[in-house]
Amino acid sequence: MQGSSALLCKIRVLADQSRSYLSLGTINIFNFLCSVGSMVHLSLSLWRFCLLSLPLASSLSIPQKAIVEESEDSTLIRDLVIDDAELNITDYTSLDEWNPAEWDYDVVIVGGGPAGLAASMSLARVARTSLLYDSQEYRNEQTRYMHDVLGQDGQVPLKFRSTVRQQIEQLYPDYSFWATRKTKVIGIVPLEKGFRVYDDKGGKVTSKRVIMATGIKDVLPDKPGFAEAFGRGMFWCPWCDGHDYKNRKLVVYGKLASAIGSALNMRKLTTDITIVTGGPLSKEDKEAAETRWPGWETVLKNSYKIPIRENDITKVERTTTSMEPKDDQYKVYLNGGGPLDANGIIIHVSTVQTSSLPKQLRLNMDGNGVKVNDNKESSVNGLYVVGDANNDGSTNAYHAMWSAKRAAVHAHVSMSKQEYLDSVPSAMVAVAGGHEDFYRRQMEELESHIGDDVEQMYKALGG
């Protein structure tokens, strides 16, 4: 311990001397400690101690604010609600908090849609405790009915969620727990073998794993009537909503190549389709369409009789008061020529992450989706991203539930493995004698998990 104390003192001195280096935009503390390691010969145990001292080293040179003051002052929490990407994930207060002796839950689930609920049930089935946070931000908030889900076709989404939650509460009260409704997770801090999670009401809990089912949101054009029509006659998924417009008038709005695809997907339901391209077609638009749909112009105009309007939509106006799909009717106003009558409108829009947690955690991204492996684990070990928020290319209720199930299975298996490894030192002492620390060091050398811990720590600190 004397050598460890001397090393920590040396780290403190060098941290003070290297303040300008450590305050660079990318806080490369990992490289800083490597330089210390080159000056001081470190055994494995001391090197691990050095790694565990990273939070302390960073706090010596970087001005920090406590995430939650002991007085439970909520000023910082309110600030984080405004921009929760500001949460500084290098804020730690002690080595005990870096590696808690006890965990509040096995898994924290962020998101209360089909994916989050599926994760909660799956974990309860193997006696894993979970805490689910539901900020009640849903991509299908305005959707009137669910479709293409066995046993739930035509179900109201709110009723579906409520029914599932009630069932979980009744069957698994000892394992599935719920944060206060509309509580939003604003920070997730990776620890040595788990996470600390902060919410916008000043609460914090620890868990061995995190499953994020935070979803994405559609970015609609800022045009009159679009926000009101979306989910109520304006849609993007033929499987979710297309059948409601069988043999009815349909407008497809978007870039030509994509709009042709949607029109073709709807032709079995209706042939009364008009494509609106958003403006005059450029040479690039036509070439992109030809690459994807060879002979498109001849087929659409001569065979399928689908008119193409090279205009933009200026606004949409609902012309009926009834909100049932069978009564949907709209006037679609263009920037040239008369308005179009339509019962349904298919649009192509971009999406963004609903939560800023992926950015805050510096997760690897693939376009707008969080990059995950086959088990839905992100670039941070033990943190899974399921449903629409990940990059596996599918967005529907089945996918949300399946991906959550896959993540829950992997989380349970990985926790079981870690629990086994953690139990080996005490078991060896009982059989062979000696000290637990000796056997623990041996296990640490064997765990392939160690290398991942170092990489995770490095990325969390800005590397």
Image (tube, rainbow, N blue to C red):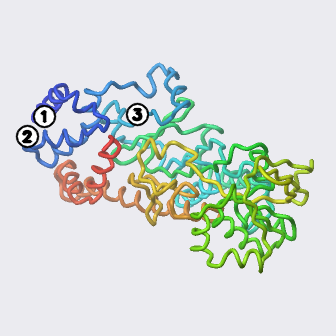
Please name the residue shown 87% across and 66% down the image: 248
* Secondary-structure class at tag 2: loop
Near mark 2 (Cα within 10 A), the count class, few <14, some 14-19 or many ≥20, is: few
Horizontal side of 57 relative to 459 (left or right) equals: left
- Gap between marks 1 and 2 measured at Cα: 8 Å
Residue at image location 85% in from the left, 57% down from the top = 340
Instruction: Give the foreground label among 1 and 3.
Output: 3
Tag 2 residue:
40
Quarter that holds the C terminus: top left
Q: Which mark is residue 462?
A: none
Q: Quadrant of residue 62?
A: top left
Taking the spot 52% from the left edge, 57% from the top edge, the residue there is 390
Q: Which callout, 1 or 2, points at the residue further toward the start of the chain? A: 1
- Say few, some or many: other residues with alpha carbon within 10 Å of mark 1 (under 14 / 14 to 19 / 20 or more): some
Identify the element where label 3 is drawn: loop
* Residue type highlighted by circle 2: Val
Can I make out residue 401 in this image? no
Tell me, yes or no, whether the two marked residues, 1 and 2, touch with CB atoms within 8 Å.
yes
Q: Earlier in the sequence, mark 1 or mark 3?
A: 1
Quadrant that contains the N terminus? top left
- How far apart marks 1 and 3 lie (CA) works out to 26 Å
Q: Earlier in the sequence, mark 2 or mark 3?
A: 2
Mark 1 residue element: helix
Q: Which residue is mark 1?
A: 7
Give the residue pinned by disc 3: 88
Badge 1 amino acid? Leu
